Image: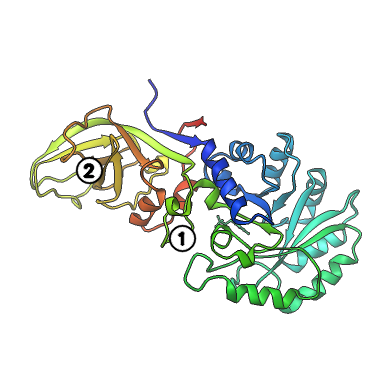
Amino acid sequence: MPRPLKARIHLSSIRHNLGLARRHAPASRVLAVIKANGYGHGMLRVAQALRGADGLAVLSLDEAAALRAAGFSQPIVLLEGIFGVEDIPAVVDNRVTCVIHRPAQMEWLCNAAVSRPIDVWLKVNSGMNRLGFSPAAVADAVAHLRQSAAVGNLLLMTHLATADERRGAGWQLAAFQQSTAGLSLPASLANSAALLRYPETHADWVRPGIMLYGVSPFADESAARAGLRPAMTLQSEIIAVQQASAGETIGYGEGCRVERTTRVGIVACGYADGYPRHAPSGTPILVGGAKTQLLGRVSMDMLAADLTDLPTAAVGSPVVLWGEGLPVEDVAHAAGTIGYELLCALAPRVPVAEEE
Ligand SMILES: *Cc1c(COP(=O)(O)O)cnc(C)c1O
C-alpha cells in the first residue's frame, strides 16, 4: 500500500476556471500563466487542460521547449525574457515570444541574425518597480525595436502591483496609457485580480494565473464567491490516534499543551510534502469531511489533528489538507502566507492523481 498522501488534480475545474476567465474578458485573448510547474499542478498536465487558451506563459526556455515538444502551437511568452544572447537560438527554434524588460535584452534581440523574426512583449514599469522600462523610455525603445529586422510583432505589457488590494489598478493603468499613447500597439495588463475586477485593464491579452487553479487572488473575496473551483485537493489519512491527557504536549517542543483530554489524529503529511511548517495550532483541516484544527508543530512527514470532537474519526479516516471543502487560502492565511506559495511548494515526492 502506498502512503495515503496524494494531490488530486481536478482537470474539469481548471477548464471551468478558464471558462470563467473568458466570460469575464470576452474580447481579450487569454495567456494562461503556467509558470512554477503550473503553480504546482504539473505544467504539461495543466497545459493539456488549458488547450483552449490562446497562449501560454512560462519562465524558462526548457519549459517552452517541453511545451513545443508536446505539440502546443500557440504563442509561448517567456515572462522574464532571455538571460543571455546565447539563448536566442532556442528562442527561434521554439518560436518563443520574449518579454524585454531592460535595454540589454533589447540589444541582444535587435542585433541577432535570425532566420525568423522574434515576437516581443515590451515591459513597461508603470509603478510596480520590479521589471520594465520607465514610462519615459518606452517610445524610444519601441522605435528601436521597430527598426530591427530581428523583431517581429510587438506588444506592450505591464504588471499590476495592487489589483488585489484597495488601491486597485487605476493608477497604473493611467501611467501605462500615458506612456504608450500614440504607439498603436496591442497591450496586456491584467493578472487574475484585474481580470476579475477591472474590465478597463483587459486590453488585448489577459494573463490569468492563480484563478485558473481555483484560488481567489483577493483577501476579501473567496474563490467560491468568485465562481472558481479548486484545481488541487491535497489529501491523506489518519495513520495513528493518540489520547493525550490534560497538561500533556503534542509533537515536538512544548508549544502545544492541551487543556483537556484530547484525541489526536496523526496525519501522513508534513513539511517535506509542502505543508507549511509555520502553520500554527488552530490551522483548519478536514477529517472525514468535518472541519477541525491542527495541533502542535508540523513535522517533516506528519502533523496532528484534533479529533476530540470527531468521535467516529479513526485510523484510515480521510483527511483534506486543502482543496475540495477547504480553500488553500484559509490554510495559507493561518500560516501567514498566500495560496500561491502553498500550491507552488507541493513537493515532488507527493504522488499526483489526475482526474476529471
Ligand atoms: C505570474 C504572473 C501573472 C499571473 O498572476 P496571477 O496573480 O497568478 O494571476 C501575470 N503576469 C505576469 C507578468 C506574471 O509574472
**Where does the image place residue 343, in percent across and percent down from the top left?**
47, 46
Q: Can residue 301 be seen here? A: no
Q: Quadrant of residue 251?
A: top left
Specify the quadrant of the image occupied by residue 287.
top left
* Residue depicted at x 21% and y 29%: 314
Q: What residue do we see at 38% from left, 35% from top? A: 235
Question: Of label 1 and label 2, which has the lower sequence position?
Answer: 1
Residue at 60% over, 72% down? 129
Is 51 positioned to the left or the right of 221 in the image? right
- The picture places residue 207, in percent across and down from the top left corner, at 63, 56
Residue 147 in view (yes/no): yes
Location of ligand 1 given as a quarter of the image:
bottom right
Q: Which mark is residue 287?
A: none
Q: In which quarter of the image is the N terminus?
A: top left
Q: Is residue 350 above or below residue 329?
A: above
In the rendered view, would you say 140 is above or below 312?
Answer: below
In the image shown, does 53 or 81 lie closer to the viewer?
Answer: 53
Label 1 neighbour load within 10 Å: few <14, some 14-19, many 20+: some
- Amino acid carrying label 1: it is Phe
Mark 2 lies on residue: 251
Q: Which amino acid does label 2 sit on?
A: Gly
State the colouring used for the structure image: rainbow
